[in-house]
Amino acid sequence: MGCLDGEALTAMSVLLKQGHTQSAVARLLGITEGAVRYHRRRRAEGAVDGRSRQIGKAAEYAEAIAHWRSGRGDGAINIAALHEWLTREHGYTGSLKSVQRYWSRTFPAPVMRARRRVETPPGAQAQVDWAEFPGMVLGDEVVDLSALVMTLSWSRKRAIVWSRSKDALAWQSCHLACFQRLGGVAAVMRIDNVKTALSKGAGAWGEINPTYRRFASQMHFHVDACQVRQPRAKGKVERSVRDCREYLDPYSGVFGNLADLQAWTDERMTERSGQLRCPATGTKVMQAWEQERFLLTRLPETLPEPFDVAVRRQVGDDCMASFEGRQYSVPFRFIRQDVEVRGVSGRVLFLKNCEVVANHPRGTEALVVIDPAHFEGPSTPRVIAPLPLGRMGRKLQEIASAGVQHRSLDLYARLAEVAR
């Protein structure tokens, strides 16, 4: 006998009143003709399903069930776990189905929140996320790789860049590589709550990592972090990650190094953009991207070098500024001014008005790193140039520039003569 819900019973009654035959109604509802006759007769008699009046066995344990429910807070409810707990702790002998029926009758389903569907205009937004690929084979080594996936929200054009790490330098380097492949920078980057992007908190109330904030300012985009546990808030890039695993499937190829894998990925992504269709325009993604790329912010002629530290320091009267426990020289014209210090891969850059004014090796054994050229040059209206080196100073510099193994006793004798 077919089991019909209230909506199906109402539809059956309306169809029969409109003159449809019982066999026609049965075909429309996907049940047997006997089921139509049965329900038609019972509705005519005003019969009520007696099962709705039965008291379930689980109702005897109402107090225990309420106690178990109060300990779960707002978390997800597992009825199977409740049934197991009742059986173990209270000797319950009923079925799981009986507990499910009691729960659905006693506790109403939680309210649902509708989701707002938003289609951003061209050039307005790109969505960014990491994808993990452990156990990748590159040449003769097995490595865990990460792929930064960036998707333009309007055209759905994708860029995928591979990396061996997910640190701040890799985060910015992959951003720059994606920008190059997409032909520009969208106005807003919707990101996940990774530590390289948010140093504290999450979502709209999170605190943007200072290095990423500086990078975003230099590349002219705003940072929009998703709310926690809301993957649909960046559903376009989530779909791209899934497509990356299914369509791209990097495990199916053999690659000698990371460059080979990246070249193969770029080729596959170009091919894919000619297959997928853009929902906003109905055209292929490649065609939609050709329209959107002209609305993206153009990349600078010289891309900034990725950095993992960005701080401000004041240059002292001795033309030195501190960074990571060391003192670095800066051109004398910047004394008593604040400069931006960036720690890049193997280098320390000092910037003023976004222009590099000093460049030193990073993490040296020496705690004082000096470039003599920073003390040379004409005075400025604000700063008088340092006094030039005397004979002794020049001779000391000459000795310092020569390796210890090349210094002879005659050299020190001549130095003594200079001192007289």
Image (cartoon, helix red, strand yellow):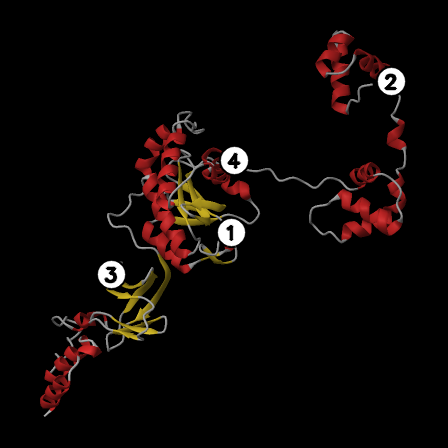
Residue 287 visible in the picture: yes
Contact, mark 3 vs mark 1 (Cβ under 8 Å): no
- The quarter of the picture where the N terminus appears is top right
Cα gap from disc 3 to disc 4, whole angstroms = 44 Å
User: Toward the viewer: 307 or 266?
Assistant: 266
State whether residue 334 is above or below residue 276: below
Helix, strand or loop status at disc 2: helix
Residue at (86%, 14%) from the top-left corner?
41
Circle on res. 203: 1
State whether residue 27 is above or below residue 205: above
Residue at (13%, 80%) from the top-left corner?
394
Q: Earlier in the sequence, mark 2 or mark 3?
A: 2
Q: Amino acid at mark 4?
A: Arg
Cα gap from disc 2 to disc 4, whole angstroms = 45 Å
Q: Earlier in the sequence, mark 1 or mark 4?
A: 4
Residue linked to disc 2: 42
Residue linked to disc 4: 117
Residue 130 visible in the picture: no
Helix, strand or loop status at disc 3: strand
Circle on res. 356: 3
Q: Amino acid at mark 2?
A: Arg
Contact, mark 2 vs mark 3 (Cβ under 8 Å): no
Q: Earlier in the sequence, mark 3 or mark 4?
A: 4
Q: Is residue 403 left or right of residue 189?
A: left
Image spot of residue 82 (x, y percent):
79, 46
Residue at (77%, 52%) from the top-left corner?
70
Q: Amino acid at mark 1?
A: Gly
